[in-house]
Image (spheres, grey):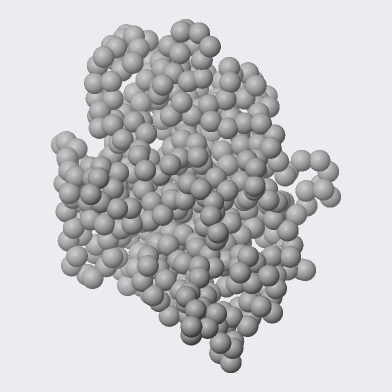
Amino acid sequence: MSNEMKWVRRNLIALWDGQPYETPEDREANMAECDRILIALHRFQTKGQVAYRRLLGMHGGGGGTSDNGFRDILTKKVQLDIENHYGGNFPQNGYWPEPVPNATPPQLVTEDNPDRAFAYTFCWHAQPEFLIWHRAITAEFERGLQQHDPYFDGCSDPSDRHKDHSALGAPYWAWEGWDGLTLPQTVGNSIYVIKTDKWEKQGYPKGSVFPNPYHRWFSPVSLEDQRTEYFPTTLNSGNTTTRAAAFDDPGSEFSQPWEQITSSKKPSMEYNVYSALLNRNWLKFCTMNADVGGGNLSIENAHNKFHNHVGGITMGGVQGSGKQIDSVGLEYTGTMGQNQSIFDPMFWLHHSNVERQLCSWQKLHITGTAEQYKESVPSEALMKTVLYPWTKPNYLFSGRLSWNTPASKDADATFGDWFDHTTLPYIYDDYLLFNDDAARYKGNPMYGGLTPPSGIPIRNEDEVRMKVYFSIKFYKSGEFALYFTASSTTKRVLVSTISVLSSSEGVCGRCGSRRKCAVGYDVTETFPTVQAAEDAWNKDKSGKLSLTRNDSDIEITDVKVEKWFGDDEKN
């Protein structure tokens, strides 16, 4: 399919204000497109609420239905996921949902629970599969959004909703330059007012109002309520997703950082994103994994910071004070700070933007001859990794979805099936560092051009990586800051920070199979050589390393130091 025939994912924050435009007609058309997107998502969350929640549940649980066929299919995929990736053992002592306000209280889910698949976390974090797994779930969401697109109301052929350039694309929010202080109206307003008269025949005249579907949605309900397909009758401050209170309460402070300006040891989010994009090595670009990834300068670190900053770690948030029931001694966060983050509709704008970042990286580095871009191609073993519960792209785009397609070798998607973005039926209206596909639009909403912002270097091979180990009980969502004190008479100085999005108590095969915990930092600015970094951990030297999580000290159990790029490193 040529790019001219692919549907387009557009910047919703720009469309909200009618951008970009040169004439009043352009602005009106853009605002009508904004109406179209909001109507489609509102329908998906209301008329299609069972299907919508079913999709959410395939990220971190919570999507159960009364359909035993679906439960059987999902249970089999859970079994295969565990057998293929985590040694065959269902996670023991896992609680679901993870502790967020307004959700049902966490309950222990054991292997003999017949509904265990409705509590299971499939999503990949801190692993090389992270970006491609989320590429698939965003595409499946897009399919559902198209199903409720008002543009095709009355269309005689239902498949037209999913064809070529007229189909609706999953919108994004280009948050790279966001100030982190105020939410755009697109996600902050509690109601949506139709901006144009384009959709009057579909029942949405100009000025009509409905709840803003990007503002909030229902929090997870119990396994029992999922099976009966229970939904609250209305959205209210006691049953919906929550965000950091500081977005709404001037007296509250943000519990998680969002750097706007690069300072010593604290890169801005824009710096983080562009540093990752300019790293040609797939593993360093894609994951914060301490063993093989790019640590605090990976694209995943920026992704995690967005989740944690929006969610916060305090009870309640911008949607209301919320309810918090701490019956099992777990740590609560806002919705975006846990594996059930997908219940906050902002998740979709966020992950469509992360997909845009991934496509931008692929356009930049997967080019030329195979020899030229071999460092940017994942290993053969990674390409063969099966990404449960998703189906292959040709299955999804022909309507064979993951929830109703039994697991099989022919249907189950691998990493390699989803890796090549040029084979997928969508493009973006704007790319970071590239503008070729965006050229047919009148301007670019947020970013463009061929050069990154000034002051952002291309990473080099002399950098030093420090892996810092600590107790598994502390490996959960939050900001991990590494400090160094040169001597007993000097103040400790910040070495670097990294943001983690994880849980050590959820129903997650990855979490349950974890035996050690570490975070990886680029420490070159403080320790320019491997020897200098090793000396910082040497008990016979005067210096001392220390680690905090959300400003609370945690004990370092071990430190390993190496060059950022190993001589025999493979993707």
Above or below: residue 157 compared with residue 287:
above
Q: Residue at x 19, y 38 (%)?
A: 235
Q: Residue furthest front?
A: 489
The answer to whether residue 260 shows anywhere in this view is yes
Q: Nearer the viewer, residue 135 or 411?
A: 135
Q: Position of residue 266 (x, y in %)?
A: 52, 57
Above or below: residue 326 compared with residue 335:
below
Above or below: residue 307 compared with residue 569:
above
Q: Position of residue 56 (x, y in %)?
A: 37, 45
Q: Nearer the viewer, residue 160 or 62?
A: 62
Q: Residue at x 16, y 36 (%)?
A: 234
Q: Left or right of 325: which side holds 551?
A: right
Above or below: residue 2 compared with residue 138:
above
Q: Position of residue 545 (x, y in %)?
A: 51, 78
Quadrant showing the C terminus: bottom right
Q: Residue at x 61, y 69 (%)?
A: 526
Q: Residue at x 51, y 19 (%)?
A: 20
The answer to whether residue 379 shows anywhere in this view is no
